[in-house]
Image (cartoon, rainbow, N blue to C red):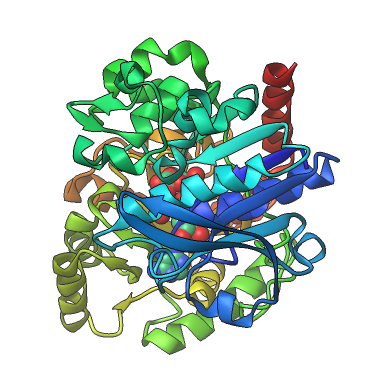
Amino acid sequence: MKVIHVSAECYPAAKVGGLADVVGALPKYQTNLDYESAVIMPYYNNKYAKDAKYTSDFECEVALAENNYKAIVYKVKNSFDDLGFHLYQIKIENLLDRENVYGYQDDTERFIAFQKVVLDWILQFAKAPEIIHCHDHHTGLIPFMLTQCTKYKSMRGIPTIFTIHNAEYQGEFSFEKLSYLPEYDLEFSGILEWDYAINPMAAAIKACWRYTTVSPNYMNELPYSSTGLDWLFDTEREKSVGILNGIDTDVWNASTDTMIAKNYSAKTVEAGKKANKLVLCEKFGLDPNKPLVAFIGRLVYQKGADIMAGIFDRALDANDINGLVLGSGDPHAEFLLNELKEKYPNRYNTFIGYDEELSHLIYAGADFLIMPSRFEPCGLNQLYALRYGTIPVVRTTGGLKDTVKDIGEKGGFGIRHEHVTVDDVALAITRANKLYNDTDEFKRIRKEIMKIDNSWENSAKEYIELYNLISK
Ligand code: ADP
Ligand code: GLC
């Protein structure tokens, strides 16, 4: 194998957000370009693991201070044929093999153990991969361990790429847990350190060969992003490359999607969206004759969750539209969004939870999708929306700025706003409503956006070029 991707999430084995979509698609597109790739991730006790067939590839023990855990690396049978890449999952009994991906008090221990087993597994290969590609902070200690830990000395020449999907989450923990790491020369502890703690995101930036961000604009924003690592991003800038995420057009394809009510293409977009909207509106008690403005996502500060109910309240008050939210997260945001249902019966609804199938139906049935993000490293929702003929209404930030052009500009096809305030977003929704009522222009745009090529093909090539550059 040429590249091994290391990640906490990978669709369809485990998904919390866009990280899973990226790691579940990029390797497939790399394989299609004759660049053999694989993914190694944790084994979680979830539905995928219950249904999957495994063969065991490697067994070892992993120590965290005085505790020893049994670890098994499984290979998912037929993954190469089914997914387009080899998929490996590490089961660490009584530590990593829980139902959820994150959210446990011992997440630090879980992901340190995971990273150690990844390297132990690679160490036993006769022929190691040419590149190790790490994704986000859960894998951020790998570049450090590879370059500094005595145990992995023989693998020091393997280049590492670290991709930042979200610099807000850095996985920092106290130096009290230093003994969890394999032995290294303590003189080099500075590589691990940021703000008196061990910071896996910072350590990865310092120790990797190159780091990438999931959009070019996010790379430019990071030195001013107030993540606490601004200075580091500024000084290490030479090592960074911004590569825009793509989408898996096999999974996200309105003409073949089995999760939506009626398949359609750009040619049949009017009838197709109408049929999906009808089913969606029926399901949620909404009026199919009014424009439907939706939100899908984690209800967190990043996504504007704290003002989401305020946004819909103002927008529904000012416009004759429907609103629909699919998401979960902050309990207060969930409460306010549920409360809004009573104020706007037959015009607004909330679905609290995670539902992959419903998300597809919303991309297909909605007219507009809002993303009032405070920051957005790339954002995939706007790309899925475009592909399903749903016009994105986004804040001008991160990857949203790279992928959505405002209708006020030449060749524009979406709606953008500058600020994350109730007023600004509601005003953007009012512009959306105006566009909806300009029927010919609205129809023209939604046909056009379905044809925009945001597939992984180009970006997968860019990653391979980067691998080739550093492995020479
Ligand atoms: P992030 O990774 O920051 O959450 P992205 O836009 O990159 O944001 O990707 C989010 C992914 O998660 C998309 O595939 C989106 O459809 C999906 N998603 C988010 N929330 C939900 C939900 N509640 N139900 C189903 N899918 C969801
Ligand atoms: C992160 C970001 C999101 C990005 C995704 C996949 O979760 O928040 O913007 O699209 O990773 O790279």
**Residue 233 visible to an observer of this rendering:** yes
Find residue 361 and report its horizontal and vertical position in percent: 54, 74
Q: Nearer the viewer, residue 288 or 471?
A: 471
Find residue 83 and report its horizontal and vertical position in percent: 73, 62
Where's the N terminus, which quadrant? top right
Find residue 309 and report its horizontal and vertical position in percent: 19, 64
**Residue 170 visible to an observer of this rendering:** no
- Residue 311 lies, with reference to residue 55, above or below; the image says above
Q: Which quadrant holds residue 433?
A: bottom left
Q: Which of 204 and 82 is in front in this view?
A: 204
Which residue sits at x=48%, y=45%? 116
Farthest front residue in view:
66
Which residue sits at x=53%, y=72%? 365
Q: Nearer the viewer, residue 439 or 331?
A: 331
State the count of labels: 0
Find residue 125 and report its horizontal and vertical position in percent: 72, 43
Which residue sits at x=41%, y=46%? 138
- Residue 298 lies, with reference to residue 354, above or below; the image says above
The quarter of the picture showing ligand 1: bottom left
Q: Which quadrant holds residue 235?
A: top left
- Residue 408 lies, with reference to residue 97, above or below; the image says above
Apparent side of residue 374 relative to residue 270 in the rendered image (left or right): left
Where's the C terminus, which quadrant? top right
